[in-house]
Amino acid sequence: MAPTRRNQRSLSGPERRRFVDAVLKLKRRGEYDEFVRTHIDFYVSDGEQRLRVAHMTPSFFPWHRRFLLDFERALRRVDPGVAVPYWDWTKDRGPAASLWGADLMGGNGRRGDRQVMTGPFAYRHGRWTIKEGVTDGDFLTRDLGRPEDPIDLPTARDVARALADPRYDVPPWNSTSPEGFRNRLEGWTSARGAERWQNHNRVHRWVGGHMLGGASVNDPVFWLNHAFVDLLWDRWRRRHPGSAPYLPERPPGPGSSQHRRIVARDEPMPPWDVTPGELLGHKGLYKYA
């Protein structure tokens, strides 16, 4: 039976424990750190002269859909009753929200070194050591809201503006794309200060610590964030059934700055032999409640 992804706030105590226990078991096996390494390896910026499939690119949504699906399948090999919950950050908007409880994600990092001290992923409990990262340090870090440089979580209005755009993506197919649902939700802009980051990117900035950059998978809240992003992509497709579900349909030609730097609808996305076109829907794979 296909798993049902639910809002984290609707999970019962036992359901939270089962999800956490499955994540911790993947960590003990070393499987979790393989997911961290994959995301680090494929976190390629559009300033680099090579293929981008995970970020700053049209395949942002399908790449993370497959990544999330692989993680969920790994969890379900541990416990077939587990599904990845989602975090609706337009409603659960502060450090007091239920997902930051000691029975799910744990709380904020302490002052000074930003080390997370509570919950199942606190280093002091001996079950969550950072092994794959882009900086030194064995412990998970967070800086919720970034008090020294404050930033708020995205609002329902922010999401509505992204969902209202009927175009999936537009040239130049990167972080500078001025319009299109993909970049409006991924959240790259040319603004200054905190307004530079929108929607998905703003969530990563708000959590801070390990959620900044390619090693963000070290914080398990990564999966709850991307489950919501995946749900929003699903809502966009339902709202715009007449729009092209993925762009570009054909690879940019040799004269384009994006030649061989992004994948078109029917080109495979590394590290899998799967195309964006094959991941435009999730019927039979999972559903949302």
Image (cartoon, rainbow, N blue to C red):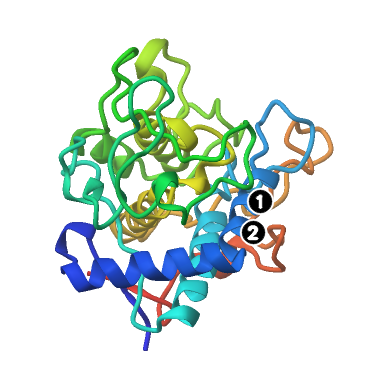
40 to the left or right of 185: right
**Do tag 1 and tag 2 residues touch (Cβ < 8 Å)?**
yes
Label for residue 37? 1
The local crowd at label 1, few if under 14, some if 14 to 19, many if 20 or more residues have their Cα within 10 Å, is some
Residue visible at 71% across and 60% down? 271
Q: Amino acid at mark 2?
A: Glu
Amino acid beneath label 1:
Arg
What SS does tag 2 mark? helix
In the rendered view, would you say 79 is above or below 205? below
Residue at position x 24%, y 40% in the image: 160
User: Is residue 253 depicted above or below 126 in this figure?
Assistant: above
**Does dot 1 land on a helix, a strand or a loop?**
helix
Residue underneath mark 2: 34
Q: Residue at x 49, y 81 (%)?
A: 77
Q: Which mark is residue 149?
A: none
Image position, residue 103 (x, y; %): 24, 57
In this view, the residue farthest toward the right is 254
Q: Nearer the viewer, residue 195 or 169?
A: 195
Q: Quadrant of the C terminus?
A: bottom left
Residue 87, above or below 138 = below
